[in-house]
Image: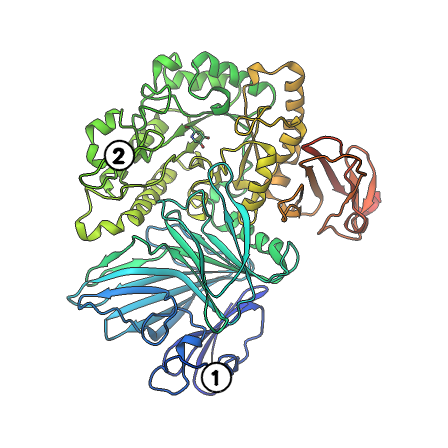
Amino acid sequence: MIDVQKNTTGQTIFYLTTKTVSLVLLVTESGIVLTPYWGGRITSQDISYVTGEITRASYLADADGQKDFKLEQLPQIYPAYGYTDLRGPAFAFLYADGSRTTDLRYASHRTYSGKEKLDGLPALRPSQDCQTLELRLADPVQSMEAVLRFSVFESHDAITESVRVANQHKTQSVRMEKLCSANIDLMDCGFDLLHLSGAWGRECHIRRRPLEQGTQSVSSARGASGHGHNPFAALVTPDTDEVHGEVYALHLVYSGNFTVSAEVDMHQNTRFQIGINPFDFSWLLEPGQSFQSPEAVLVYSGEGLGRMSQIFHHMYQDLLIPERFAKQERPVLLNSWEAHYFDFDGTALTALAAEAADIGAELFVLDDGWFGKRSDTTSSVGDWTPNEEKLGGSLQELTAAIEETGLAFGLWFEPEMVSPDSYLYRRHPEWVIQAAGRRIEKSRDEYVLGLSNPAVCEHIITSVGNILSQNNIRYVKWDMNRNLTNLGSTYLPAERQQEQAHRYILGLYRVLETLTHQFPDVLFEGCAGGGGRFDPGILYYMPQMWPSDDTDAVERLAIQYGVSLLYPPSVMERHISAAPNHQVARREPLETRAAVAMWGNLGLELNLVRMDKAEKAALAEEIAFYKKVRPLVQFGDLYRLKGLDGGNQYAWMFQSQDQKTVLVSFVQIQASPNTVSKRLRLRHLDPDAWYRIEGSGAVRSGREMMHIGLDTGKIRTDAYSRRWLLTRMDRASC
Ligand code: DGJ
């Protein structure tokens, strides 16, 4: 809901209110837009006293010639640098005369139901109860305008924000050097900064540190959101855990270079920002041109991280991933990578598919190595022509043979890269990202195609599109195995070279928009050497992602816990892989590998042909169980019960939307001697309902399971797991 009021002193106040949250904006007489409040829901009363009661600090400049009107200590919605606020600004423009001062003041506003699309960028779709406030700010001296667009998702309990700036000067260009998607000033600094960090193979680990005076940030300058950090951070009160504490979270719907920062100033206020990384970024705005920022998602929770996750999950499940897949159950797939790597032929693939079909898989994914003359990483990326000699026939024939086993067929691509040893590179060396006069550095034996050039994007659309239209491909794994280095474009003029990284992402979005529209029934899965580009921007086009190349169940616990802070279960793909595991050589029991892989979309990635009968039978049982609970784990509500401390025990549970079924999983990583069994307490059950526990047949009340808990058993082995499937009993059968 958006409520606009004028108070007795003539100030305009905007109340942006969702189910449990309020964000209040206040326009001062001189047109500065303040944010007196963001937090738990309040009523639309005049709260101008909040900023009125801020006492005066020393050594700060007065603004507008008014004694004691000190911008630098006021919470603002989109602050500039240099007028009288000397903290980090939300934006920076360089004008033709060399001046850098911009002073954006309120000019007008409009509100409307729904939400407009963002030009060329992914963004949340409007919910039925979505309303938008557009605030137009202007600097008449420099003829600059910024439109801040807030969309309020009442029942989803979240707000999105994006910014569009326009150079309205008739003759002069402006160089934009920074543009945040959202800036929030909080009048406190008693927070921890919580974020998701890591590296290849150990993505999305939860990190947390107390704020200190100064600026702390997480960012990427890798050309992708990256393995290092997710484009997210939250300020959380020190008592925050899964159920307690206040959480102020920002997440960027963007797949390129980003920064999230928290600046604690000298008066213990915190400026919290998210947007495109200003490092090595600038954008030339010719007279009359405008620029649209990516969208930020603003989530407040007064009930810890669990509530924050519920809000993000429902937002992304309902309003971000392609609608076509939002409620569609995802297939149990077998991916050929860890079974064969590059070493396969058509016969081996068909044999693997037959085994997979036998134990209940539904889709076969042929990973890297099917095209050009590719038999290792050194060649052929870019030459998307099936290697018929290796496949033992055409791709159509292979697809038919796989379909004969009962499985659908999926295929791997890495469309944004090119091997130096490829026809494509020999034909178009100028298409590669390169700094003039310097060696083009390889990574995984690849160069990066410059997607800031529309001709490159067209080529990708055509080459991938051809394979998809000539073959019955139901799924695409879209991989991206390196970062952008030696930045330079043969296509962009000198004055636009710093636009390259953002233009790359805009090009990628255009390619994905086109292909996903052309092939709406193909299930696209995003991958970037694992979770190197796992972000809401990609999710807008691809309803599922591969979070890490680390398939080890124990390793996956921390990764999946971190991913689940933001992303709903149905977008995360997990595979049961071989023991010993290929990344860390650990051996874990199948039931634990399966339990962890059932934290969302279950798949397989191992050579079934080499497994013995008993193992295959056990795997078939796991898959059969999974199919029974699939709607529950893909579309139910997820609650994390243990693991926030990154310690020895993890537990999580799914509850169906109708609250009739609950799946609880528990894993202990290491056993220790001479221990006794302990109990796992559940949450969010109906205390007065009775539940039957599958297997034992025991009947327990919700109250008992929340207060007394379930017996986790005597633990004598490492990588120990247990799971419970609970069915709520109707009154008659109690
Ligand atoms: C990296 C991916 O993350 C893997 O799953 C696999 O597809 C390889 N690339 C193939 O080269």
Whether 348 is drawn above or below 444: the answer is above
Q: Nearer the viewer, residue 320 or 31?
A: 31
Asked which secondary structure carries label 1, the reply is: loop
Horizontally, is 168 left or right of 240 in the view? left
Asked which secondary structure carries label 2, the reply is: helix
Q: Nearer the viewer, residue 610 or 704?
A: 610
Query: Can residue 729 be seen here?
Result: no
The amino acid on which the numbered mark 2 sits, given as a three-letter code, is: His
The amino acid on which the numbered mark 1 sits, given as a three-letter code, is: Asn
Alpha-carbon span between mark 1 and mark 2: 57 Å
Whether 320 is drawn above or below 289: the answer is above
In which quadrant is the C terminus drawn? top right
Ligand 1 positioned in quadrant:
top left
Q: Position of residue 397 (x, y in %)?
A: 40, 16
User: Residue placed at 20% from the left, 31% from the top?
Assistant: 428
User: Residue placed at 38% from the left, 34% from the top?
Assistant: 481
Residue under numbered circle 2: 459
Q: Position of residue 83 (x, y in %)?
A: 32, 75
Horizontally, is 108 left or right of 523 in the view? left
Residue under numbered circle 1: 7
Horizontally, is 147 left or right of 599 in the view? left
Q: Position of residue 121 (x, y in %)?
A: 36, 51
Horizontally, is 450 left or right of 725 in the view? left
